[in-house]
Image (cartoon, rainbow, N blue to C red):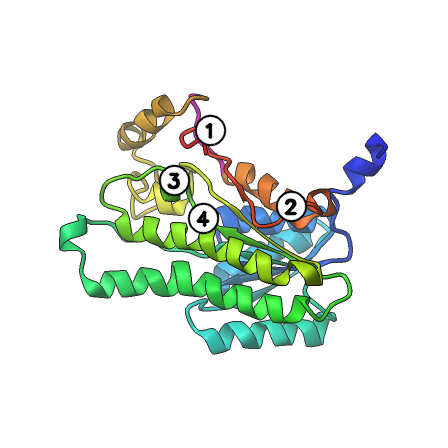
Amino acid sequence: MQATTLIESFRVDGKVAVVTGAGSGIGKASALALAGAGATAICADIQDDTAQATADEIVANGGSAEGVALDVSVRTDVDALAQRVVTDRGGIHIWCNIAGIMVEGPFLEAPEDDLDRILAVNLKGVFFGCQAAGRVMVTQAEGGSIINASSAAADAPSPDIASYAICKAGVVQMTKSMAVEVGKKGVRVNAVAPGFVLTGMTGRYFVRPDGTIDEAMQEAVVGPMRRHTPLRSIGEPEDIAAAVLYLASDAARFMTGQVLRPNGGVAMV
C-alpha cells in the first residue's frame, strides 16, 4: 500500500457515526475527530445542550453533525435513535459507546443503588448500544465499526472504584464476544482502554463549582498520576480520540475483538 493510500485509509468520508457521551471529554473529542475526518457525527449525550454544543462546533468548522439527547441506560431510547439515524441518514457505519459515569467508595461499603446506577450506564448502556448498532450493521453490505470505552481500571486495579472497574472489565469481554458473532457480517468491534485523562470526570477533584481550577489540588491529583506513568505524562481527550478514529477507519480493517490501551504505559497487557 502506498503512503498516500495508507494516509487516506484513516479518512471516514461519507460515513455516519453515532457517538454517545459526545457532550464532553473523550466523547466530544471523538466526535470532533470523526467529523474532522469526514464523517457525519450524531452527537448524543444525556445533556442535550452539551450534545448540541458539540454538533454546533463541528458545523462551525465546516463539518456535518447533529446533537441529540440520549440516556444510554434506556434501551428503547437507544434503539429508537439507531432506527431514526438509519431512516434519516441511510445507515450507521460507526458507533462509539463512550458515555460513562464514575461511582467511588470502599468495596465493603458500596450501596446497591450505586452499583445499579453505574451498571446501568457503563455496562448495560454499552450493551444496548452494541445491540442497536449491530442489528443495523449486520444488514449493511459495508458492515460497520463499533468502538467501546473500557479503561485501564480493567487491567490495573485501584482502590475505591471496584464497581467502575467491574463495568470496564465487562466491556472488554463484551467486545470480544460480540466480535466473534458479527465478524462474518463485516462488523468490527473493538475497545479503547484509556489511562488517566483530563476530563470532567477526573477534573471533579480540582475544578471549583464556578469552573475555575484549584491549582494546588490539581497538582495533588495529577502529579502522582504523572509520576506513576512510564511516559511521565497524562492523557488528553484527543489522545483517546486518535485511537477511536483509527478503529473506526479502514486503517483498522483487520482489527476486531481488540483493546487499544492509550494509557501512557500504566498497564501493559
Where does the image place residue 261, in percent across and percent down from the top left? 50, 37
The secondary structure type at the circle numbered 1 is: loop
Residue 148, x across and y down, in percent: 52, 53
Foreground: 224 or 139?
Answer: 139
Mark 3 = which residue?
Answer: 155
The Cα atoms of the two marked residues, 1 and 4, are separated by: 15 Å
What SS does tag 3 mark? loop
Residue assigned mark 2: 255
Callout 3 touching callout 2 (CB < 8 Å): no
Q: Which residues are magenta?
A: 232-236
State the CA–CA distance, disc 3 to disc 2.
20 Å
Mark with earlier residue (1, 2): 2
Q: Amino acid at mark 3?
A: Asp
Q: Quadrant of the N terminus?
A: top right
Judged by depth in the image, the label closer to the viewer, 1 or 2, is: 2
Relative height, residue 240 to residue 142 (above, below): above
Q: Position of residue 10 (x, y in %)?
A: 73, 42
**Which of pointers 1 and 4 lies earlier in the amino acid sequence?**
4
User: Above or below — where is 113 with respect to 257?
Assistant: below
Real-space Cα separation, disc 4 to disc 2, in angstroms: 17 Å
20 left or right of 199? right
Assign the magenta stretch its main secondary structure. loop
Left or right: 137 as drawn, with respect to 208: right
Mark 4 Cα shell of 10 Å, populated few (<14), some (14-19), many (≥20): many
Q: Which mark is residue 172?
A: none
Q: Which residue is mark 4?
A: 150
Mark 1–mark 3 CB contact (< 8 Å): no
Whichever of callouts 1 and 3 sits on the residue coming sooner in the sequence is: 3
Q: CA distance from mark 1 to mark 3?
A: 13 Å
Q: Which mark is residue 264?
A: 1
Does the rendering let one see residue 262?
yes
Front-lying residue, 36 or 182: 182
